[in-house]
Image (cartoon, rainbow, N blue to C red):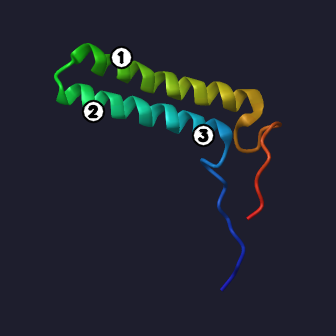
Amino acid sequence: MSTESVDPGHGHSPAAWTAVIIMLIAFTIGAVAFFFDAPIVVWASAALAVIGLIVGWIMKRAGYGVGGSKYQPKGH
C-alpha cells in the first residue's frame, strides 16, 4: 500500500472554513425560523447563506484559499 496522498486539499483553508461556518449558522437560523413560522427570518438566513458563499470566494481571491499566497498548510 502506498502512503502518498493525492488529496488536493479541498476545504482545508481559511476561506473554506469561514464560508462553511457562515453557511452553517445561516442554515441553523433558517431551520429554527422555519419551525417557528417566521418567513422573513427564513429568507434572511437564505441571504446569509449566499453571503457566506461570496465571503468564501472573496477570501479565496485574496489569497486565503488552497494554493493562495496567504495560505499556509499545516503539517500533519
Q: Nearer the viewer, residue 41 or 71?
A: 41
Question: Which part of the image, by quadrant, shows the N terminus?
Answer: bottom right
As displayed, is residue 33 above or below residue 39? Answer: below
The alpha-carbon separation of the residues under discs 3 and 1 comes to 22 Å
The amino acid type of the residue labelled 2 equals: Ala
Question: Which part of the image, by quadrant, shows the C terminus?
Answer: bottom right
Task: Name the N-terminal-most of marks 2 and 1.
Answer: 2
Percent x, y of residue 6: 67, 65
Percent x, y of residue 22: 50, 31
As displayed, is residue 28 above or below residue 44? Answer: below
Q: Residue at x 70, y 38 (%)?
A: 65
In contact (CB < 8 Å): disc 3 and disc 1 = no
The amino acid type of the residue labelled 3 equals: Ala
Find residue 20 and name its label.
Answer: none
Percent x, y of residue 61: 71, 28
Is label 1 in a helix, a strand or a loop? helix
Q: Residue at x 69, y 68 (%)?
A: 5
The alpha-carbon separation of the residues under discs 3 and 2 comes to 22 Å
18 vs 33, left or right, is right
Q: Residue at x 55, y 23 (%)?
A: 54
Q: Residue at x 40, y 19 (%)?
A: 47
Q: For the image shown, how many numbered marks are present on the structure?
A: 3
As displayed, is residue 23 above or below residue 1? Answer: above
**Residue that label 2 marks:** 31
Task: Name the N-terminal-most of marks 3 and 1.
Answer: 3
Task: Name the N-terminal-most of marks 3 and 2.
Answer: 3
Find residue 16 and name its label.
Answer: 3
**Residue that label 1 marks:** 44
Is label 2 in a helix, a strand or a loop? helix
Near mark 2 (Cα within 10 A), the count class, few <14, some 14-19 or many ≥20, is: some
Q: Nearer the viewer, residue 34 or 53?
A: 34
